[in-house]
Image (cartoon, rainbow, N blue to C red):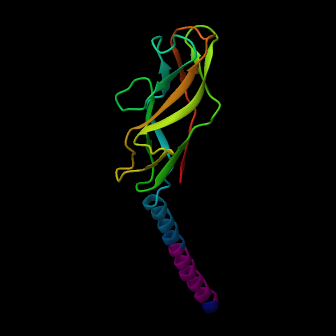
Amino acid sequence: MAILLEYKIYSFRLYRHINALFLRSVIVFILSLISFPCFSLCIVPERMKLEFSGMYVTGLNQKAKSTPFSNRVDVARFYVEGKPGEHVVVTVPHRQFIYKERGRERLKVNRFIYGCGLSKRGIVRIRSNGRTPLLCIGAVVKIHAKNSAGRYSSAIRFEVNYK
């Protein structure tokens, strides 16, 4: 009987010891998850449309250009939030179109122009507050003779990744 009682006391102490170790490891794991968050990129839109009004789109074989500045309303403007200090690359697919407000006409975007906080190659560094400065994307389109005057606009697709 004494051996059985001694075994139960020993196994109870061992169980308590294992239970405390398990609880400690669970607490350390949860604290490590909280203290090291995963930084994913988040796009904060301000205005995500490229727009060419009727005054641009007139004439024969002209080029219209929306130059990216922070005070322009015809460019796509946005912020990116992520891990502070990291570099971010913005890439735009080549084959995109800007459509007429009414009708089925479209203009092919010849070239995209990066501006505001973006470099020529679309690279920017995230500030210490976790947000980039204002980022702008403009475009150059060629207006052919078949395109009528009017308002052309479209949202653009782009991709943002850590460098």
Q: Main secondary structure of the magenta part?
A: helix
Q: Quadrant of the N terminus?
A: bottom right
Residue 107 spot, x, y in % from top left: 60, 19
In the depicted structure, whether residue 118 falls above or below residue 26: above
In the depicted structure, whether residue 61 falls above or below residue 23: above
User: Along the horizontal axis of the image, is 157 left or right of 126?
Assistant: right
Name which residue lies at 45% across and 12% down: 55
Image quadrant in which you'd find residue 98: top right
Residue 108 spot, x, y in % from top left: 62, 24
Which span of residues is magenta-colored? Answer: 4-21
Viewer-closest of 4 and 135: 135
Residue 5 spot, x, y in % from top left: 59, 86
**Count of numbered labels shown in the rendering:** 0
Residue 7 spot, x, y in % from top left: 61, 87
Viewer-closest of 140 and 69: 140
In the depicted structure, whether residue 59 falls above or below residue 138: above
